[in-house]
Amino acid sequence: MKRREPRSWKITVPGSTANLGAGFDSLGLALNVFLTVEVHEAGDWQVIPLSSALEVFPTDETHFIVEVARQVADEYGKKLSPCHLYVSSDIPLTRGLGSSAAAVVAGIELANALCGLDLTQESKLGFANRLEGHPDNVGASLYGGFVVSCQHEKGVSLLSVPDLPVDVVCVIPKAELKTSDSRNVLPPSLSFGDSVEAGAISNVLVAAFLTGDWETVGEMMKRDRYHQPFRRKLLPHYDAVEEVAVRFGAFGVALSGAGPTIACFVEREASEWLARQLQQTFPHMDVRKLSISSSGSTITTKQPKVRPSSL
């Protein structure tokens, strides 16, 4: 029986910023920072980190990406063949830029390739939402661009817009903000009146994004009632970043996900200037000028090396 050549793939997943102010757990934007996984079938599981920040994670089959892939495979009664994974990432970890969501999506793509599942985007999103708990970051990483999503009893509904003419300058503190702290500071419920107001603000925010009304985008970001009034108190630098960003061209400022990163939204032609001003004002923080990633996760098959025939 002819032995099959080991297969190889390359998985690329963009990071993301979510909530965008008033779009709590529903709005996301894919960014041009990426998690990359080179996959090579092998006799055992090994995960080799190519970025120093990833060296804290397991290097065997207990790695989170492998565990996600195994859950997806189990759902279809399939078994994963062992692989060597070479993992690199320029998505800052635990900073509200979708690093965990990107890992979830990478695990789903890994199972899809290894087991030949031929999953639809909708099926991938369903798995990702179940594992992550909300569809905003994973939706952006899967679809790319600007995504508007919601959870309901039948699953997830999502609409995506490939691109918007904006950049995002991120101000990233050195210290992380624990997700548990960010969640615990939120109120357990909102009154009916507050919920109606918050939902209306989010609706106008989406419409402003889609019509390019950047002034209204910024205004609706500031009017959020869902999470920012509570979470910004955990970040003593938030007001200072917002003041400088708006002074030098940002039309809107919002927490990225649960924080601590602050996302400053700006029209593309002004993004370099804004980034320079923020770098000069906050030299103790990491300032990155990011663009929208119009494509979501991708997986490409790598051709095996052709062995020379023996004479």
Image (tube, rainbow, N blue to C red):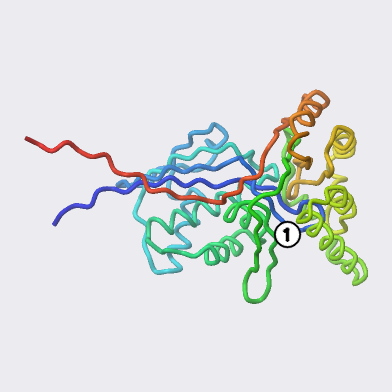
Given residues 126 and 59, the one toward you in this image is 126
Residue 145, given in percent of the width and then of the height, sits at 64, 51
Q: Is residue 125 above or below residue 170?
A: below
Local secondary structure at mark 1: loop
User: Which amino acid type is marked by label 1?
Assistant: Asp
Q: Residue furthest bottom?
A: 153
Image-quadrant location for residue 225: bottom right
Is 71 on the left-hand or right-hand side of 200? left
**Residue 105 falls in image quadrant:** bottom right
Is 309 left or right of 41, judged from the image as shown?
A: left
Q: Quick one: label 1, few (<14), some, or many (20+) residues within 10 Å? A: many
- Tell whether 10 sits left or right of 143: left
Image position, residue 301 (x, y; %): 38, 48
Quarter containing the C terminus:
top left
Residue 93 is situated, as x and y percent measured from the top left of the image, at 63, 41
Left or right of 159: which side holds 182?
right
Q: Residue at x 85, y 39 (%)?
A: 238
Q: Which of these two is toward me, 203 or 35? A: 203
Q: Is residue 236 above or below residue 100?
A: above
State the residue at coordinates (48%, 34%): 50
- Where does the N terminus fall, quadrant-wise? bottom left
The residue singled out by tag 1 in the image is 25
Residue 189 in percent (x, y) is at 85, 66
In the rendered picture of this protein, how many numbered marks are placed on residues? 1
Measuring 87% from the left and 60% from the top, which residue is drawn there? Answer: 201
Q: In the image, what residue occupies the spot 65% across and 54% down? A: 137
